[in-house]
Image: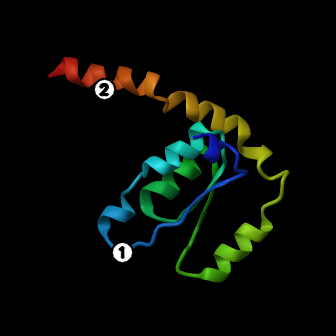
Amino acid sequence: MDYVASCDWGIYLMENICKNHDYALPNKLFDYIMAGLPVVVSNLKEMSKFVEENHIGYSVDTTNSENVIKLIKGISKTSKGKFSENIKVVSKKYCWEQQEKVLLKIYNSL
């Protein structure tokens, strides 16, 4: 996690080769969030929805490499700051301490 936290951005570009990928919310995405990093993700259904709804980074069409290059080259040091407050909120909401409560509530309801 120290290595991840030393980065400026978290980039997770997954190809849409199956339905599993389209609906995935990979652990690495949450690693980036917990490290306080804004993210760039593939425009797959669930990842892009999560990122866009929480305003924590960008999603990009990975089938067009020019779009990916343009987006990454367009990221400046100041663009990271516009996501920082939202990342703090999301990291508190999705940390283990909060998600444990959700999981225990589900278990207790069974």
Q: Is residue 86 above or below residue 99?
A: below
At which x and y percent is residue 96? 44, 28
Q: Residue 9, relative to residue 19: is it above or below?
A: above
Q: Considering depth in this image, is 70 or 4 the residue closer to the camera? A: 4
Which amino acid is tagged 2?
A: Leu
* Labels 1 and 2: the sequence-earlier one: 1
Is residue 27 found left or right of 1 in the rendered image? left
Q: Residue at x 58, y 42 (%)?
A: 33
Q: Is residue 55 visible?
A: no
The Cα atoms of the two marked residues, 1 and 2, are separated by 30 Å
Residue at 36% from the left image edge and 58% from the top image edge = 23
Circle on res. 17: 1
The quarter of the picture where residue 91 lies is top right
| CB within 8 Å, label 1 to label 2 | no
Q: Where, quadrant-wise, is the N terminus in this rendering? A: top right
Q: Which residue is mark 2?
A: 103
In the rendered structure, the answer to whether residue 77 lies left or right of residue 25 reads: right
Mark 1 residue element: loop
Pointer 1 local density, CA inside 10 Å: few below 14, some 14–19, many at least 20: few
Quadrant position of residue 73 = bottom right
- Identified at 50% across, 43% down, the residue is 30
Q: Residues within 10 Å of mark 2 (few under 14, many from 20)?
A: few
Name above or below for residue 50 compared with residue 92.
below
**What x and y, as percent, mark residue 71?**
71, 69
Q: Residue furthest left?
A: 110
